[in-house]
């Protein structure tokens, strides 16, 4: 047969037309043609079949159910006779029926049949689980509680026997063992793997808790092993038994972190393969990361597209990477942030999407393309501000940290800064930190609403610590601190105490501190309101008692100090303080000079000080750049009348040429100068002294200054300077070698007669468990000194802190 016509199939069911001329070979093909014709006749009816959606359900009929009654099955379903058929609701019914575990996996099927009235009959065809669990047994599982095992297995006595659920329980128990570092544990489903079983039996060989004995890297020719160890979460056990538990689930995350580290160095084709090598006793493993670095990529060109409201030249000025440089992933992230912030300060929320394109004709080079998305001309403005989640803290405590007011231009970088300030308050959950979201308001215009979400947490701390240093000997520290205090939120019932609402919620700080020591004692109570009347002014009040035994005399000081400060901008702050103190100088030797003995007894000091501070350090603990400037003038009245002026400046310097390739390991130079002058009427307890740690090292505490008959009498002029050079030793940057030169003098009058110089070296050790400040150990040797100065080669500071 040869066809001379065509064929057309209509989805609406129109007939198909075929025009053919018969030939001698037609008859053998007749059965095939009949089959084709039959299929074509069926197609229109299938295509024309109607969906059951929306049709009224006549009845719902369960089929094949023997153990579960019709009523049991229908009670689980939400679909009902007399309601329209809803495919989504039917699928939810199937999920719920399967969730009962009455039926085998996939054992619930739904079919429909239309009737002549245009309604639908629904059939629920089920395959029931015929056996139930008579007993659940755990063999050899000794290090997980029975309650947790039952929860992990997810099966109880009386449940339908479901082999799939039982196998999932076995896998969950095995994962639990691996999470607890029992890497070689095995869990077997002895019974419960067949539908005909009546018991579920899990048998385990727990194995030992596995520690990480060593972490090694192979193939890391261009990256320090120490720096790579800092990237991974897996850590080696300290001394073989402290920490270092092995969790195989972390290997993949570690692999990705190592690859990300290499990408930042320009090795975009790096490959990382972790290998776990067990020890013979199976108690430790050696983890070896095999690394194929490849070659570092260079930048062929850099391009910025999508910018509309800001000129290309202004955006180019924010970037540093140029053609010919090695590709630097860290620098790419920094440049993206600078571009987005440039738009953000103008009230425009953009997203800069980076893309890398290899250059086929130049292997090893990539084009860096920054695509600016969302650039539009009109700036956004702040609409409504909503605060959520603060059950104790007042709204104003949170709003004071925002620097955002309705109606002003919405500067997007301020949102990130506000989030950090909220975190630094320390009054919200660190595991679920505060977040600020910009949401479109209901009018869909330039005004964007701000939603702040916080999660309250414990804000009170009780800390016990200890410390020792070469200046003050051994001292203890007992601190009670509340970071979210409210002086005026008095309790109205015992529930306020129980729920933590009494005297809490205003963002104030209240601190009680006791520091008993071998040489001195200090006790104080401090209250601070950082935003007085919701302004940029802060108020601090402190009452204190201090006593110390010096070589020349014993000093007792009790006083009260109040300070009002004003934040001018990100760096500058001014302050005005008033102090009133009662002084008692006693235990003065009979042969002490008049410059000391004239001040024996009790006296009153009233001081008023005006100061200004500028702080631009990048870190309070380990600054690498920035500076601190502090200047103040105080007029003292009372039993003594004299002025005091101080100026102090510290500068931190570092350079990218003296650091590791990844930006860590910075060499830092710290320069510090302090100039202080007091009036002629200044008593012995208000004069200046030098020597010791954080002063002129190489001399003992208060071992530098004017001296009369072997008594250090203090000076009215002080000029102290330090040059210190820090060099990191460990790849973790937790151990530094420092070299320094301390020089300066303390004189009776504004004059330089006996200038001291000392040079030395030391170490800084960061031990997080001992507190934020590093341990300091210094050796210094005087080069020039006065004949009466007291030398001290070694000075140190060690702190130990704990809290709850």
Image: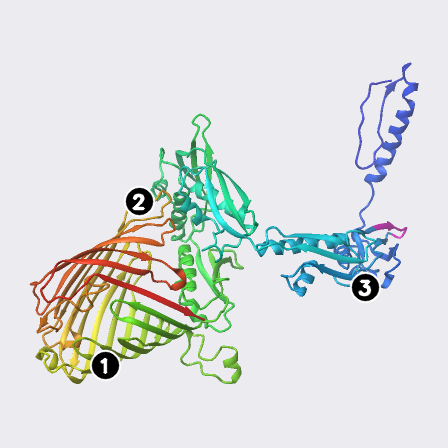
Q: Residue at x 45, y 51 (%)?
A: 349
Q: Work out which residue is located at the far right of the displayed protein and give it.
A: 27
Residue position for label 1? 556
**Relative depth, front residue between 115 and 279:** 279
Q: Where residue 370 appears, x then y in whole percent?
A: 43, 40
Q: Where residue 413 appears, x then y in whole percent?
A: 40, 55
The tag on residue 144 is: none
Q: Secondary structure at mark 2?
A: helix
**Relative depth, front residue between 175 and 141:** 141
Find the distance from the CA under tag 2 to the CA under tag 1: 50 Å
**Relative depth, front residue between 696 and 120:** 696
- Specify which label sits upstream in the sequence, 2 or 1: 1
Q: Quadrant of the C terminus?
A: bottom left
Q: Which residues are magenta?
A: 111-117
Residue position for label 2? 656
Residue position for label 3? 75
Q: Is residue 385 visible?
A: yes
Q: Residue at x 35, y 76 (%)?
A: 513
Q: Where residue 249 appears, x then y in whole percent?
A: 57, 50
Q: Secondary structure at mark 1?
A: strand
Say which quarter of the image contains residue 714: bottom left
Q: Where residue 615 appears, x then y in whole percent?
A: 28, 60
Q: Secondary structure at mark 3?
A: helix
- Specify which label sits upstream in the sequence, 1 or 3: 3
């Amino acid at each position: 047969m040869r066809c001379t016509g065509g064929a057309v199939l209509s989805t609406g069911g129109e007939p198909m037309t075929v025009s053919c001329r018969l030939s001698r070979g037609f008859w053998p093909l007749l059965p095939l043609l009949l089959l084709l014709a039959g299929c074509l006749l069926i197609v229109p009816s299938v295509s024309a079949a109607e969906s059951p959606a929306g049709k009224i359900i006549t009845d719902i009929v369960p089929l094949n159910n023997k153990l579960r009654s019709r009523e049991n099955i229908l009670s689980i379903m939400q679909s009902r006779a007399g309601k329209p058929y809803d495919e989504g609701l039917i699928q939810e019914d199937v999920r719920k029926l399967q969730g009962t575990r009455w039926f085998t996996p996939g054992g619930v099927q739904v079919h429909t049949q239309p009737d002549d009235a245009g309604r639908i009959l629904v059939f629920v065809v089920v395959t029931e689980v015929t056996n139930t669990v008579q007993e659940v047994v755990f063999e050899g599982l000794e290090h997980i509680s029975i309650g947790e095992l039952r929860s992990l297995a997810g099966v109880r006595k009386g449940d339908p026997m479901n082999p799939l659920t039982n196998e999932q329980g076995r896998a969950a128990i095995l994962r639990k063992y691996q999470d607890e570092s029992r890497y070689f544990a095995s869990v077997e489903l002895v019974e419960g793997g067949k539908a005909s079983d009546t018991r579920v039996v899990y048998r385990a060989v727990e194995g030992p808790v596995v520690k990480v004995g060593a972490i090694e890297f192979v193939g890391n020719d261009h990256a320090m092993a120490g720096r790579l160890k800092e990237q991974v979460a897996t850590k080696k056990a300290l001394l073989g038994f402290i920490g270092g538990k092995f969790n195989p689930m972390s290997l993949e995350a570690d692999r990705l972190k190592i690859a990300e580290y290499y990408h930042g160095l320009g090795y975009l084709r790096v490959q990382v393969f972790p290998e776990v090598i067990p020890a013979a006793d199976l108690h430790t493993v050696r983890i070896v990361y095999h690394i194929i670095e490849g070659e570092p990529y260079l930048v062929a060109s850099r391009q910025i597209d999508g910018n509309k409201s800001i000129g290309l030249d202004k955006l180019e000025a924010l970037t540093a990477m140029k053609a010919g440089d090695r590709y630097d992933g860290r620098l790419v992230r920094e440049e993206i942030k600078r571009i987005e912030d440039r738009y953000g300060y103008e009230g425009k929320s953009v997203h800069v999407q980076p893309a890398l394109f290899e250059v086929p004709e130049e292997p090893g080079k990539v084009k860096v393309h920054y695509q600016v998305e969302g650039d539009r001309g009109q700036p956004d403005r702040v609409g409504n501000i909503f605060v959520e989640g603060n059950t104790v803290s007042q709204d104003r405590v949170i709003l004071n940290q925002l620097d955002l007011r309705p109606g002003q231009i919405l500067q997007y970088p301020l949102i990130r800064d506000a989030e950090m300030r909220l975190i630094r308050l320390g009054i919200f959950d660190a595991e679920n930190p505060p977040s600020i979201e910009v949401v479109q308001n209901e009018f869909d215009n330039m005004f964007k609403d701000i939603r702040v979400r916080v999660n309250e947490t414990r804000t009170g701390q009780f800390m016990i610590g200890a410390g020792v240093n070469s200046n003050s000997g051994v001292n203890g520290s007992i601190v009670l601190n509340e970071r979210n205090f409210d002086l005026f939120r008095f309790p109205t019932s015992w529930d306020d105490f129980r729920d933590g609402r009494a005297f809490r919620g205003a963002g104030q700080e209240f601190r009680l501190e006791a520091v008993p020591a071998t040489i001195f004692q200090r006790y104080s109570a401090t209250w601070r309101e950082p935003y007085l009347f919701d302004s940029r002014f802060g108020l601090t009040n402190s009452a204190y008692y201090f006593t110390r035994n010096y070589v020349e005399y014993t000093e007792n000081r009790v006083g009260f100090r109040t300070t009002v400060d004003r934040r001018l901008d990100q760096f500058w702050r001014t302050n005005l303080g008033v102090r009133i103190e009662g002084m008692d100088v006693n235990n003065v030797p009979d042969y002490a000079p008049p410059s000391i003995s004239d001040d024996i007894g009790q006296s009153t000091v009233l001081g008023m000080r005006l100061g200004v501070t500028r702080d631009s350090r990048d870190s309070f603990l380990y600054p690498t750049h920035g500076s601190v400037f502090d200047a103040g003038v105080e007029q003292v009245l009372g039993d003594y009348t004299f002025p005091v002026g101080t100026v102090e400046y510290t500068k931190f310097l570092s350079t990218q040429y003296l650091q590791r390739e990844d930006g860590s390991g910075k060499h830092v130079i710290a320069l510090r100068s302090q100039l202080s002058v007091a009036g002629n009427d200044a008593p012995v307890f208000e004069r200046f002294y030098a020597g010791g740690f954080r002063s002129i090292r190489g001399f003992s505490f208060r071992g530098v200054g004017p001296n009369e008959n072997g008594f250090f009498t203090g000076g009215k002029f002080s000029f102290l300077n330090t040059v210190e050079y820090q060099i990191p030793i460990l790849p973790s940057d937790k151990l530094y070698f420092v070299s320094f030169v301390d020089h300066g003098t303390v004189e009776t009058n504004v004059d330089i007669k006996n200038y001291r110089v000392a040079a030395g070296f030391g170490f800084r050790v960061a031990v997080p468990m001992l507190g934020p400040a590093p341990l300091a150990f210094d050796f210094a040797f005087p080069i020039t000194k006065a004949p009466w100065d007291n030398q001290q080669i070694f000075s140190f500071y060690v702190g130990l802190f704990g809290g709850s």
